[in-house]
Amino acid sequence: GITRHYKFHIKMQNITRLCQTKSIVTVNGQFPGPRIIAREGDRLLIRVINNVKYNVTIHWHGVRQLRSGWADGPAYVTQCPIQTGQSYVYNFTVTGQRGTLFWHAHISWLRATLYGPIIILPKQQASYPFPQPFEEVPIIFGEWWKADMETIINEAMQTGGAPNISDAFTINGLPGPFYNCAAKDTFKLKVTPGKTYLLRMINAALNDELFFSIANHTLTVVETDAVYVKPIETKVVLITPGQSTNVLLKAKSKAPNANFLIAARPYATGPASFDNTTTAGVLEYDQPNGITTKNLPLLKPAALLPKFNDTNFVMQFNKKIRSLATAKFPAKVPKKVDRRFFFTVGLGLSPCPQNQTCQGPNNMKLAASVNNVSFVQPNVALLQAHFFNRSKGVYTTDFPANPPFKFNYTGTPPSNIMVGSGTKVVVLPFNASVEVVMQDTSIIVAESHPLHLHGFNFFVVAQGFGNFDPNKDPAKFNLVDPAERNTVGVPSGGWVAIRFLADNPGVWFMHCHLEVHTSWGLKMAWIVNDGKGPKQKLPPPPSDLPKC
Ligand code: C2O
């Protein structure tokens, strides 16, 4: 591979959407941010220079960061933030991966505007395991807020209530024609009849899973989270925050006398107060002489997208995703398990600070937890504390492998729904193979949670509705060609089982990729110890690693 250099100047920029101009945090003044393009095996040196008043970190979501944990980016997990006026060079090599990923800020809610695609092409001479597309088009979904998001989340955290929802969803930063004042800000996809396009889709939205569809066209899913999958033909794609999905779009062989709606809107299983609006773009064909696309009708079938709470569709869709699992692209599913975990993920309540009024039920704060532990962010980075053996007062290693008490997870919640809190981690020996069953709980509400693991891909060996049954369900695990991903939806009112090999020494965050749930504490960390071999140790930190 070669070395590629990028410069990310974090700076404020005025951007106008929905008839309102707002100063937002950007990379190089661009919104969405610039694309990172590399080939498998390349080394990336990305200098991030912070010229805004906020502390910043950038995460390269889905990049495995093999023995380069210092470049992973989550604030107070692998690094202290880059402070105003300072800079840090993220230095990592993309090994064993090719496909679509993305980068985003990983501190507070700055990722609302700080995000962009990462495109990892196959090695030179290597080809795709599907027909070579005529063109490749990144499609990154986001949200647009008229208000200042840092104010929104800081207020919500203080009062323990739910933060305000966004004002629009966006496709490549553009809300589209269904929003006031946004018709001119509409994403257009222009195609030539008969050609095949690779749409590299990324969900960078803060808080919403999305359905995606193009009127009168079938899509073929060929890759998820930068791993090739067995092709799936579908009209609708479900993509959660943190996931990326590559689809092939085959243009019709003759230019139709119409344009076609491209649409995305939420899959929502949680509280009723969610934004159910639709972001849209337009697919236009190159037309023969004399016809302008402007005058053609826009085809928008009424039932383009499933209902907002169509959990069955989502379960069926997710179950269809299978690794390619060929000799060239094998699925290296751990067959034996060294360490087994059962995690409940969901909401709960925590006490309101004295002399304060809180907005949750009974004057409590809304909280979220894994195994009833709501993660408390330390004020130094966990990775430094671990590397320099200074864990005392920073974290404890008693993260529970099982929930503290048993109940009917998908039924009537227990009467005490208070969560505990702490900065607790799980320590794993190098190369341990790990199984985690994640169970949604109906505490406060049953809800789908897109869980993201840093530092690894994991295999989604099974999923189902109801309570996981340790006696029956493991017999159904797929150890042959399960989906290999970095983000998986824990089904609303259900469970998912994953396996991964802990072959990457460092400290690795795992959290719900709905930013509101992360803020409420639905996050935890794994520590993977060094192995004995020279290629099994985390090297020391770079000299410019920011200090807290
Ligand atoms: Cu995409 Cu920890 O994040």
Image: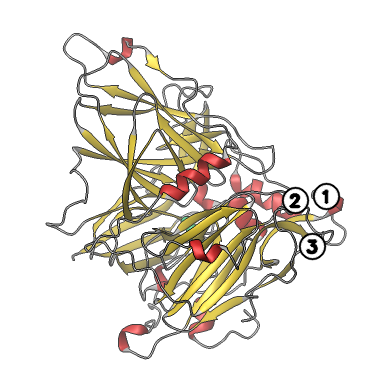
Residues at marks 2 and 3 touching, judged by CB atoms closer than 8 Å:
no
The image's mark for residue 444 is 2
Query: Residue 504: x, y in percent?
Result: 40, 76
Q: Quadrant of residue 3?
A: bottom left
Q: Is mark 3 within 8 Å of ligand 1?
A: no
Crowd class of label 3 (few under 14; some 14 to 19; many from 20; radius 10 Å): many
| Residue depicted at 34% across the width and 56% down the height | 323
| Residue depicted at 65% across the width and 58% down the height | 467
Q: Earlier in the sequence, mark 3 or mark 1?
A: 1
Separation of residues labelled 1 and 2 (CA atoms): 10 Å
The relative height of residue 256 versus residue 318 in the rendered view (above or below) is: above
The image's mark for residue 85 is none
The image's mark for residue 361 is 1
Which residue is nearer to you in this view: 467 or 351?
Answer: 467
Q: Tell me the amino acid under the disc marked 3.
A: Met
Which residue is nearer to you in this view: 514 or 412?
Answer: 412
On the rendered structure, is 194 left or right of 282? left
On the rendered structure, is 50 left or right of 522? left
The quadrant in which the N terminus is found is: bottom left
Q: Is mark 1 within 8 Å of ligand 1?
A: no
